Image: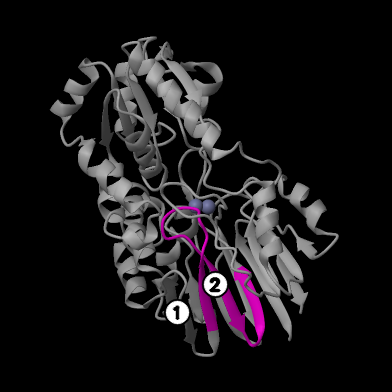
């Protein structure tokens, strides 16, 4: 037992650029190293940490707010060991290269630094355990997106668990969080939705499918702007199972992500369904195909990006917004001041004018709500302290509930906490 120093390098009372280090007896574990985007889209990195001070970096999943700044840690001559699973590596590579292509001008690293990171990669697949120079790491399924994993680390007999982003429910795409009853002294948990419970997935799915059928049944088409990793594949699987009244297309980065995810059956809950959906629904490969689709009726188009901030979903919106028989169904989080949020709140976009198509939002969250987070905390044995990150003021709802049983922290980015266990 000893003293743990936890530094919040990012993700403290903010959602994004998650980066937390834990040090015990001179050994340091870094958990995620992600980026954030300012309103004008410039990337924001987490606070600096010297690569030579890190023994091991673990990455929970391939979203850029968890992995996007990892190459920065490989720009010097010190190269810490990097841990993630094969699927997370494959997807991270695609997203990081895309990120560097778009935002490279602002970044203190380039693609070669990512390849240097990969040279120091030690794979740890879901459910596996490994010992790395006196530090033991165990992986558990986090249930957030395919490949997302929670780590339980043992540093000098202090056990620290870190969830990254987490969800407790089973979807067609991923199984919910692994409530295996792990032991930990300290739990670092996300709190994106720490003050609410989401409606049940069955209800949301039913409403979504009914709405899609209504639009298609009355001669319209539906645009479903989607995050290309996770949400798109869940929607495609759902449509494949429950919708046969029209044609379904997928377009944009979704295509590349589909092809990667179908190569990792062990990470997909209903693999067969996803495989069939990606094979039997039509992949949009050309501009002429796109033009043909928008001229016909009764289509469902699943296209990136999820907040209508680029990608082919913007093209489809421009072609579809003016017809009240069409619909735009948003199925992802819509950040403030994004086009997705604007059409939802005001039914209006400066560049287009009033949106005459039906606009609706469906709560297909991949983050646990209040009750789910509580369940995860309670699933740990021997737990003494809980640190809530990847959150805002909503964390204090969960804090109030937990503080009767544990030492609870909601630290800001830039702060350091010391915990005696
Ligand atoms: Zn995530
Ligand atoms: Zn996240």
Q: Which residue is mark 2?
A: 30
Q: Could you tell me residue 237's position as x and y percent?
A: 35, 41
Compared to residue 229, the image places residue 7 above or below, namely below
Q: Residue at x 30, y 43 (%)?
A: 254
Q: Residue at x 18, y 22 (%)?
A: 291
The magenta stretch is: 136-161
Q: Quarter holding the N terminus?
A: bottom right
Q: Residue at x 66, y 41 (%)?
A: 197
- Looking at the image, which is closer to me, 246 or 231? 246
Main SS, magenta region, reads strand
Answer with the quarter of the image where residue 124 lies. bottom left
Query: How far is the residue under mark 2 from the one under mark 1?
Result: 10 Å
Instruction: Residue at the far right: name it.
Output: 404
Q: Quarter holding the C terminus?
A: bottom right
- Residue 110 seen in the current view: no
Compared to residue 374, the image places residue 76 above or below, namely below
Q: Could you tell me residue 301's position as x and y percent?
A: 31, 29
The number of numbered badges drawn on the structure is: 2
Q: Are marks 2 and 1 in contact (CB under 8 Å)?
A: yes
Compared to residue 328, the image places residue 150 above or below, namely below
Q: Residue at x 72, y 45 (%)?
A: 393
- Horizontally, is 64 left or right of 387 in the view? left
Q: Which residue is mark 1?
A: 80
- Horizontally, is 250 left or right of 57 in the view? left
């Amino acid at each position: 037992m000893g003293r743990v120093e936890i530094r919040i390098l990012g993700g403290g009372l903010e959602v994004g650029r998650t980066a937390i280090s834990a040090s015990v007896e001179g050994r340091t574990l870094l958990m995620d190293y992600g980026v954030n985007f300012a309103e004008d889209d410039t990337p924001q990195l987490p606070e600096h940490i010297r690569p030579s001070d890190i023994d091991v970096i673990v990455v929970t999943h391939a979203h850029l707010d968890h992995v996007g700044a990892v190459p920065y840690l490989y720009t010097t001559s010190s190269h810490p060991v990097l841990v993630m699973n094969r699927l997370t590596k494959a997807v991270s590579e695609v997203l990081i290269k895309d990120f560097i292509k778009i935002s490279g001008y602002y970044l203190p690293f380039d693609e070669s630094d990512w390849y240097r990171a990969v040279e120091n990669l030690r794979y740890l697949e879901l459910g596996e355990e490994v010992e790395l120079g006196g530090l033991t790491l165990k992986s558990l399924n986090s249930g957030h997106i395919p490949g997302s994993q929670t780590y339980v680390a043992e540093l000098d007999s202090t056990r620290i668990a870190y969830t990254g982003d987490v969800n407790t429910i089973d979807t067609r795409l991923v199984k919910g969080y692994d409530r295996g009853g792990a032991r930990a002294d300290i739990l670092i948990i996300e709190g994106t939705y720490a003050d609410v419970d989401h409606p049940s997935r069955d209800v949301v799915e039913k409403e979504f499918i009914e709405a899609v059928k209504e639009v298609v049944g009355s001669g319209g088409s539906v645009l479903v702007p989607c995050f290309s990793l996770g949400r798109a594949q869940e929607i495609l699987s759902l449509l494949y199972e429950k919708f046969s009244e029209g044609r379904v297309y997928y377009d944009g980065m979704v295509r590349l992500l589909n092809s990667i995810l179908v190569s990792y059956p062990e990470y997909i809950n209903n693999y067969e369904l996803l495989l069939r959906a990606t094979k039997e629904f039509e992949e949009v490969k050309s501009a002429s195909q796109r033009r043909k689709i928008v001229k016909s009726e009764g289509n469902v188009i699943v296209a990136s990006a999820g907040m209508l901030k680029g990608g082919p979903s913007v093209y489809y919106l421009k072609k579809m917004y003016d017809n009240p028989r069409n619909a735009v169904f948003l199925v992802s989080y819509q950040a403030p001041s994004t086009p997705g949020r604007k059409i939802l709140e005001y039914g209006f976009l400066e560049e287009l004018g009033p949106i005459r198509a039906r606009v609706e939002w469906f709560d297909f969250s991949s983050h646990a709500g209040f009750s789910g987070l509580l369940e995860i905390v309670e699933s740990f044995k021997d737990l003494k302290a809980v640190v809530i990150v990847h959150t805002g003021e909503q964390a204090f709802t969960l804090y109030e509930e937990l503080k009767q049983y544990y030492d609870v922290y909601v630290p800001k980015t830039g702060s350091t906490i010391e915990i005696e266990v």
